[in-house]
Image (cartoon, helix red, strand yellow):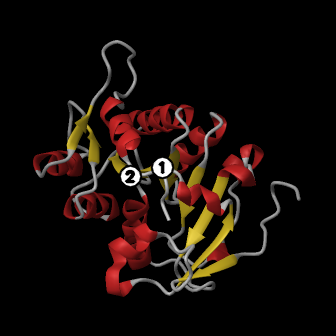
């Protein structure tokens, strides 16, 4: 199979043992009955970090997202995010470019999935999992995109918020992480205006500021790696 060919989607039902425990935990009685996927389902068994951020992130935000994804990939940590432009795609692309693996969580049915041109050349089905818990033919809707963030948080050992405005899906995902006691790391900018107001709000509510390492000039992920190392390796 060539890397640009999309395999036939497969399904895991809620009653099967392969259904991810973490989705059960975060959805509770509202658990989606079916999980549709293409790609390497074994990636769900590994440790992962969720990435949330704006479609219109600044160059600085995109650079930090790529940096974090690169560092995590070098430590065999899965990158988990959506499939929107901006932070989502910067994270997936960096993971694949640096030999890492990534999980794409869709806000629509699996039948709508296509490999985007920007990452087609580096696509590797052994290192990618695409999942959706919406009906196969479900179309994109804003409420589904918001709901999808709930799954990103649930599947992750920790969550990184890159740039969040004063409202919207990224901010909502950050609050979801705080509410469910998921370790939340929020990029700290000297200037928290112009699309970063949500970063300030999340830090004030308990998010851990993610800052640059003085020695390397890159994002300081030391605390995230400590959390990853202490988490259970089996995610089912």
Q: Badge 1 is on which residue?
A: 47
The residue furthest left is 204
Alpha carbon distance from label 1 to label 2: 6 Å
Quarter holding residue 29: bottom left
Q: Position of residue 191 (x, y in %)?
A: 21, 34
Up the image or down, 44 lies above or below 53; here it is: below
Picture residue at 53% right of the left edge, 44% below the top: 90
- Secondary structure at numbered mark 1: loop
Up the image or down, 189 lies above or below 9; here it is: above
Q: How many numbered discs, if any?
A: 2
- Secondary structure at numbered mark 2: loop
Location of the N terminus by quadrant is bottom right
Q: Which mark, residue 176?
A: none
Up the image or down, 157 lies above or below 95; here it is: below
Q: Earlier in the sequence, mark 1 or mark 2?
A: 1
Picture residue at 46% right of the left edge, 78% below the top: 141
| 78 sits left or right of 166 in the view | right
Nearest the camera: 181 or 107? 181
Picture residue at 53% right of the left edge, 52% below the top: 46
Q: Position of residue 150 (x, y in %)?
A: 37, 68
Picture residue at 73% right of the left edge, 49% below the top: 123
Let me know if residue 195 appears in the view: no
Q: Badge 2 is on which residue?
A: 157
Up the image or down, 236 lies above or below 183; here it is: below
| 210 sits left or right of 60 in the view | left
Q: Please say if the residues under marks 1 and 2 sit with CB atoms less than 8 Å apart.
A: yes
| 150 sits left or right of 194 in the view | right
| 48 sits left or right of 2 in the view | left
Q: Position of residue 109 (x, y in %)?
A: 59, 79
Nearest the camera: 27 or 165? 27
Let me know if residue 145 appears in the view: yes
């Amino acid at each position: 199979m060539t890397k640009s060919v999309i395999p036939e989607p497969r399904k895991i039902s809620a009653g099967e043992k392969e259904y991810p425990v973490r989705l059960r935990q975060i959805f509770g009685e509202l658990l989606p009955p079916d999980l549709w996927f293409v790609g390497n389902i074994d990636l769900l068994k590994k440790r992962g970090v969720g990435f949330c951020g704006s479609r219109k992130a600044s160059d600085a935000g995109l650079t930090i997202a790529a940096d974090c994804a690169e560092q995590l990939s070098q430590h065999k940590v899965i990158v988990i995010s959506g499939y929107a432009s901006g932070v989502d795609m910067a994270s997936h692309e960096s993971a694949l470019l640096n030999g890492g693996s990534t999980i794409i969580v869709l806000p629509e049915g699996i039948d709508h999935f296509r490999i985007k041109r920007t990452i087609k050349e580096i696509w590797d089905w052994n290192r990618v999992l695409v999942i959706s818990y919406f009906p196969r033919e479900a179309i994109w809707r804003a409420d589904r995109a918001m709901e999808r963030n709930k799954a990103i948080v649930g599947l992750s050992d920790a969550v990184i918020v890159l740039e969040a405005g004063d409202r919207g899906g990224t901010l909502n995902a950050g609050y979801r992480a705080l509410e469910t006691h998921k370790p939340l790391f929020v990029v700290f900018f000297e200037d928290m205006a112009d699309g970063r107001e949500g970063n300030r709000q999340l830090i004030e509510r308990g998010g851990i500021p993610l800052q640059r390492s003085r020695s390397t000039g890159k994002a300081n992920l030391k605390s995230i790696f400590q959390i990853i190392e202490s988490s259970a390796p089996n995610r089912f």
